[in-house]
Image (cartoon, helix red, strand yellow):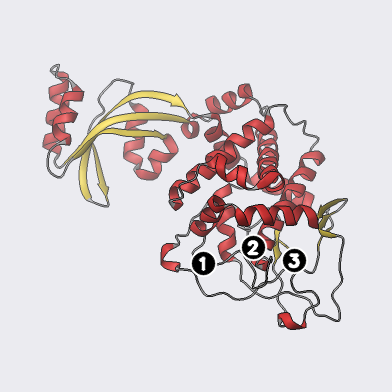
Amino acid sequence: MKRLTTRLAGLAGLTLLGLAASACNLQWSPYAARVSGHVVSTGELDSALHHASRDTAFRCLLEGASSSGYRLEGSGSDTYDSAFAAFILTDLVDSQIAYSAVRAEHIRLPADGMSLARSQVESALTSQATQSGCAAGAKDVLAGLGPSLSASFIRLQLYEDALAAKAAHVALSPAGILSFEHSHAIATRASCLTGVFVASKATADKIVSEVAAGKSFSSIVAHYAKSPGSSGGQLGCYTGNQLRSISPAIAAAVAAGRTGQVLKPVYYRGSSGAAYLVAMVTSRRFEPFTAALDQLFATESGAFAKAITSEASHLQISVDARYGSWSAMRGAKSSAGLAGRVVPPSGPKLSLVLNPSAVQGKAHVRINPSALAGSGG
């Protein structure tokens, strides 16, 4: 989805303020938000807030995504912080905006689309949990979010996939994704490497000569991996784009090498100093569908943004004043929403607000900010 980790990080930028309404002009609405003909009911939002605030795994992810700290609860009993409510409501609105764009493009959603989208969301949550040090698994997080919010995340992922697939002129199906992988191999085909970093060019050349003379590369790697100041062994699997971001020289050597062939030594300067890499491509494989879809979205992100912006410009989006107001995205991309976001309310002291227990927000003391790490999508 406008990749889930980015969406989670969007909450970190929200300011925790009070409720934007006064006792004399507060207008109560039967909905939390309206997207043209579709209504996000207060019941749907309440259910999402209830489950999300009690999902300890999801809370851990939000805290890991925030760089400043925040709390989900308001100051009163059974209330929620206005920034948290605005964040959740933005996601519910986004799902409707994306669905409207899919309809406008006359896209037929595949029967197994929800299942594939669920796998992507789980993959994103697993990645975020690993980065944030959260113990719970992705399925536990989704289960704890309840039916409304978890379904909204999954549907939004499906709509994003569908719009990106149409822009790429491929079917949102296993065959279509495989076709995309073959036509974008540098981004979707990973090379798995075994190798060793050594300190000098002379040592690197010696290794290549020993292999040419018939010595086992695996035994050489095992030997040098034990040497002081060296590292080696299974180096992992990387796409061409990933290798290029690490070292263009390594990317070029891997792209030119054959599977099972020792590559020419490559000079590399990393954070720990300079070294020479001697490596072999042990296998090449296409990325799993979930990763390939991420690449599909990245490739077509411009077309996706254009479709969303175009559709959103024709929609009438309004938010109940208790939860804030809708701020359309102008120019720069928003990390908190697709075409805009719900801005949490600001206003008078809670004592002046009619029925302030509906949603309460106030400035909070930071919660152990040194333990919270920011993230990007």
Taking the image as shown, residue 139 lies to the left or right of residue 89, namely left
The quarter of the picture where residue 166 lies is top right
Q: Earlier in the sequence, mark 2 or mark 3?
A: 2
Residue drawn 38% across the image and 29% down it: 191
Q: Earlier in the sequence, mark 3 or mark 1?
A: 1
**Image position, residue 313 (x, y; %):** 80, 55
Say which amino acid is labelled 2.
Answer: Phe
User: Mark 1: which secondary structure?
Assistant: loop
In the image, residue 282 sits, relative to residue 53, either above or below, namely above
**Image position, residue 147 (x, y; %):** 70, 44
Taking the image as shown, residue 251 lies to the left or right of residue 126, namely left
User: Mark 2: which secondary structure?
Assistant: helix
Q: Which residue is mark 1?
A: 69
Label 3 CA crowd tier, 10 Å (few <14, some 14–19, many 20+): many
**Placement of the N terminus among the 4 image quadrants:** top right
Q: Earlier in the sequence, mark 2 or mark 1?
A: 1
Q: Which mark is residue 323?
A: 3
In the image, residue 150 sits, relative to residue 115, either above or below, namely below
Say which amino acid is labelled 1.
Answer: Gly
Residue drawn 77% across the image and 30% down it: 108
Say which amino acid is labelled 3.
Answer: Tyr
User: Mark 3: which secondary structure?
Assistant: loop
**Image position, residue 14 (x, y; %):** 61, 67
Q: Are marks 3 and 1 in contact (CB under 8 Å)?
A: no
Q: Which residue is mark 2?
A: 84
Give whichever of 137, 369 is nearer the camera: 137
